[in-house]
Image (spheres, grey):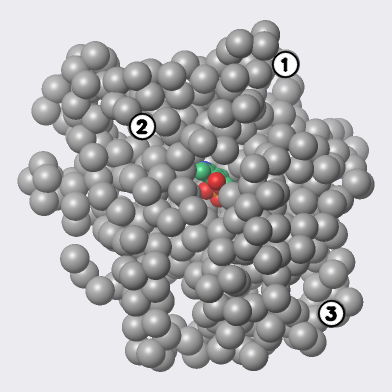
């Protein structure tokens, strides 16, 4: 296993102003600009410090349980009769999802910067749990903003955060989901910028966050690229990951960016179908999604004709967000990555099939990626390799799924 816990390739985007092509940048109030400059400088300095890398690697190995394995989904592959499906097991990372990778990275950075008050926002609750966990470990003071709709549908994660010593702050504004929680967290940051570190949970927001979160998540792809070659003697023909804000997907894709023969596919939440307009498929529906600015970055944004942000819908809280990380918008424009969607129903089917055939209950978010593998594997030769990022485990979603499958 290579030692690269974070990237080494300085030629990577974004550019000096934080742009991935025409996406990204820094669209924030003047009061936040100095904080972003300070953060970027501290991050660049940390990247150049071997001690920072060593600290992160140590925690990844001894706390998170990295490297997470790659599993051959043999029975699922047989059932579908096409490509061999492999799963990168981020569900086996401590706390049950990939978000801990980013929380530990940013937590160590906050510590270096001497900031002891950490704020975060959360949708599915997974980033809140990842953050609360990392802050408990590092001994930092943690405040998590969360929409009351999400609090309702993610009760176990709310309780976990409280156990871990975090303060959960309910957000009642707007649709009372992730985007409103982000607004409140930004407001807090403006007010308390001297003492406070804003620990952003996905590859979103103003520069340097999309770059930094990608770098902390790129351990997924760095490991998987080596593991899959060891297991199969080849690179994957196709990599698939679900895309909420885009952090697990970019974390997987990044290591394969120069492998021209590996196709990269991101899967958005198709909700109740594109025609229903109740979805979070930012790339799939040009009638209600186009480039715009949300939460400090320029990317695709779901908005009405007046530019009002649309309400989104997904069965999985982690994919239920009206914008998408700017690097994905760029990769799509370059046609280096392709984006598709899976509906709630397709994700629920994939959730059940993977559980039954592989003994792995996936997060509903990850089930969207599995749904794409189910569609695509049968169209591929039997000796081809399809790698799915299993971003998290499904325990947190059992109430939701029971409600749908048994409650009707
Ligand atoms: C939060 C979450 C996602 C979506 O976030 P990304 O930043 O797009 O990765 C996907 N899967 C799981 C398990 C999550 O908790």
**CA gap, disc 1 and disc 3:** 41 Å
The label on residue 192 is 3
Mark before the other along the chain sequence, 2 or 3: 3
**Can you tell which quarter of the image residue 51 is in?**
bottom left
Residue position marked by numbered label 1 in the rendering: 276
Q: Residue at x 58, y 85 (%)?
A: 111
The label on residue 69 is none
Name the element at disc 1.
helix
Image coordinates for residue 71, horizontal then vertical, percent: 23, 40
**Can you tell which quarter of the image residue 251 is in?**
bottom left
Q: Is residue 204 left or right of residue 354?
A: right
**Can you tell which quarter of the image residue 316 is in?**
top right
Name the element at disc 3.
loop
Mark before the other along the chain sequence, 1 or 3: 3
The label on residue 360 is 2
- Select label 2 or label 3 by which is in front: 2
Mark before the other along the chain sequence, 1 or 2: 1
Name the element at disc 2.
loop
Q: Quadrant of the N terminus?
A: bottom left
């Amino acid at each position: 296993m290579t030692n690269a816990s974070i990237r080494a390739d300085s030629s990577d985007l974004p550019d000096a102003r934080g742009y991935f092509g025409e996406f990204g940048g820094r669209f924030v109030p003047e009061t936040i600009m100095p904080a972003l400059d300070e953060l970027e400088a501290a991050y660049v300095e940390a990247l150049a410090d071997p001690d920072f890398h060593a600290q992160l690697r140590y925690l990844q190995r001894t706390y998170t349980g990295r490297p997470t394995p790659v599993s051959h989904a043999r029975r699922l592959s047989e059932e579908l009769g096409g490509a061999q499906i492999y799963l990168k097991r981020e569900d086996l990372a401590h706390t049950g999802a990939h978000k801990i990778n980013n929380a530990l990275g940013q937590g160590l950075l906050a510590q270096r910067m001497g900031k002891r008050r950490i704020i975060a926002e959360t949708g599915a609750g997974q980033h809140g749990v990842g953050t609360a966990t990392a802050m408990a470990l590092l001994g930092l003071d943690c405040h998590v903003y969360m929409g009351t709709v999400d609090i309702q549908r993610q009760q176990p994660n709310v309780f976990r955060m409280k156990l871990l010593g975090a303060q959960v702050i309910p957000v009642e504004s707007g649709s009372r989901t992730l985007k409103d929680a982000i607004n409140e967290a930004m407001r807090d940051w403006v007010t308390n910028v001297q003492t406070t570190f804003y620990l952003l949970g996905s590859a979103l927001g103003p520069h340097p966050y999309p770059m930094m979160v990608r770098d902390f998540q790129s351990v997924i792809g760095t490991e998987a690229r080596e593991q899959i070659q060891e297991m199969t003697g080849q690179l994957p023909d196709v990599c698939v990951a679900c895309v909420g804000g885009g952090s697990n997907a970019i974390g997987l894709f990044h290591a394969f960016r120069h492998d021209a023969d590996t196709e990269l596919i991101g899967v958005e939440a198709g909700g109740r179908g594109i025609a229903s307009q109740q979805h979070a498929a930012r790339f799939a529906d040009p009638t209600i999604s186009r480039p715009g600015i949300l939460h400090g970055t320029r990317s695709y944004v779901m908005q009405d004709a007046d530019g009002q942000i649309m309400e989104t819908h997904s069965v999985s809280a982690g994919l239920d967000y009206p914008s998408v990380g700017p690097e994905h918008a760029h990769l799509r424009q370059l046609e280096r990555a392709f984006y598709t969607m899976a509906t709630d129903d397709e994700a629920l089917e994939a959730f059940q099939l993977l559980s039954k055939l592989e003994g792995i209950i996936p997060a509903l978010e990850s089930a969207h990626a599995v749904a794409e593998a189910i569609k695509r594997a049968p169209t591929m030769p039997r000796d081809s390799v399809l790698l799915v990022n299993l971003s998290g485990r499904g325990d947190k979603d059992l109430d939701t799924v029971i409600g749908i499958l048994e409650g009707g």
